[in-house]
Image (tube, helix red, strand yellow):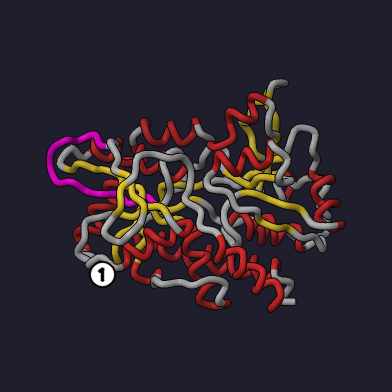
Amino acid sequence: MKKKILSMVLAVAAAVSLAGCGSSATQSSPSGNTTTANESSAGGGGQTIKIICPYGVGGTADSIARKYALVAGKVRPEYNFIVENMTGGDGFSAANYYTDLDPSTKELLVYGYGVAYRHDLGKKYQTEVVDFDRGDIYPVATVDDRTWIMYGKPGTTLADILEKSKTGGIKMSGGNPLSDPHLALGSLVALGGGKVMVVPYDGGAAQKKGLIDGEVDVFVGTTQVALEDVEAGTMAPILAFSENAFEGFKTPDGEITVPGIAGDAKASELEAAVDYTGSILAAGGFIAIRTGADQAWIDEVIQISKDVWADPEYSDWMKEIKLNQFEVYGEDAGSHLEEACAKAVAAFDTLNGQ
């Protein structure tokens, strides 16, 4: 069974390469990746610091990178922060580029949990080719913490989805095979004997459209990307991959509460005796630097990130788009990522039937 599932994952992963959300005018970078220059900077003077975002314009990661650059330039005018989008490989292209840089580089990387998860799975299980060492990337500060939400078409219930997963399998959109949304949903339905298949789309807009058009059964994504769709009534949040219920969604009929998968918030359709907390995976990401950078630069980026979080223009905005304020810095950020990666590998083992 393990070999069969891995073969399917390899075949699908080799055939697709997601580029993130949105589009813009592009140019070819020296490494052959697709890049976009960014206007997001608040300084205009001082030393220019480039922030590499591995996903396209318009997605959650890109929006956060741009807001970070804007606020960082305001609170630290001695720097001029700009964002460059470098798409390809669902984050792997940017990781390959970044780890080839000299450790003395001042470029920063938006570094997602999902890239680290897939790196570890690729190294351990050969689920995909991994051409970089994540040990060369040093997570400095969390800047993005999100709760994965499973969305369905209006009228779809969690009971419908769970039953279909057992009787033929469900189709989902949201990332590549073995992305963190896939690991979260796949491991959850596997506990009940269900199956899930990822249908790849190029970015969040297409992933949502796949659900709305009926090409997939569910979409697993962020809160930010679906707020307007939920309010318009074209999509319905069904389940939060969290120990807590999720508050804040507005529908045409008013505000709703989305059940979680554990504790008092646990959805009633889930089996009471089953522990689903292994499907709660850290999601979002960090501002990272090259491992081996001078300690003075590490300390500087930590302080810049603290200054950004302390500014209401950033922290209040995060609340508005229903993301979480979760701050971890330096060595604590590295330890947090290692724990998250270990949990993701365990979720894969569940998904894989081990």
Can see residue 90? yes
Is residue 305 in view from this perspective?
no
- 190 lies above or below 129: above
Which residue is found at the position 29% from the left and 64% from the top? 290
Residue 198, percent from left and from top: 66, 56
Q: Is residue 13 left or right of residue 328?
A: right
Residue 103 lies in quadrant: bottom left
Question: Percent position (x, y) of residue 242?
Answer: 64, 49
The residue that mark 1 highlights is 292
Q: Amino acid under label 1?
A: Gly
Locate residue 29: give its quadrant.
bottom left
**Does residue 156 belong to the magenta stretch?**
no
Q: Residue at x 58, y 28 (%)?
A: 228
Instruction: Check the image and name the residue furthest to the left.
Output: 46
Q: Nearer the viewer, residue 207 or 269?
A: 207
Q: Give the magenta range.
A: 41-53
Q: Residue at x 67, y 69 (%)?
A: 8
Q: Residue placed at 70% from the left, 58% from the top?
A: 197
Q: Quadrant of the C terminus?
A: bottom right
Tell me if mark 1 has few (under 14), some (14-19) or many (20+) residues whose alpha carbon lies within 10 angstroms of its own.
Answer: some
Question: Disc 1 on helix, strand or loop?
Answer: loop
Residue 63: % across, % down = 41, 39
The correct choice, above or below, for 83 with respect to 89 in the image is above
The N terminus appears in which quarter of the rendering? bottom right
Residue 266 horizontal side relative to residue 341, left or right: right
Q: Position of residue 243 (x, y in %)?
A: 66, 49
Q: Nearer the viewer, residue 194 or 283?
A: 194
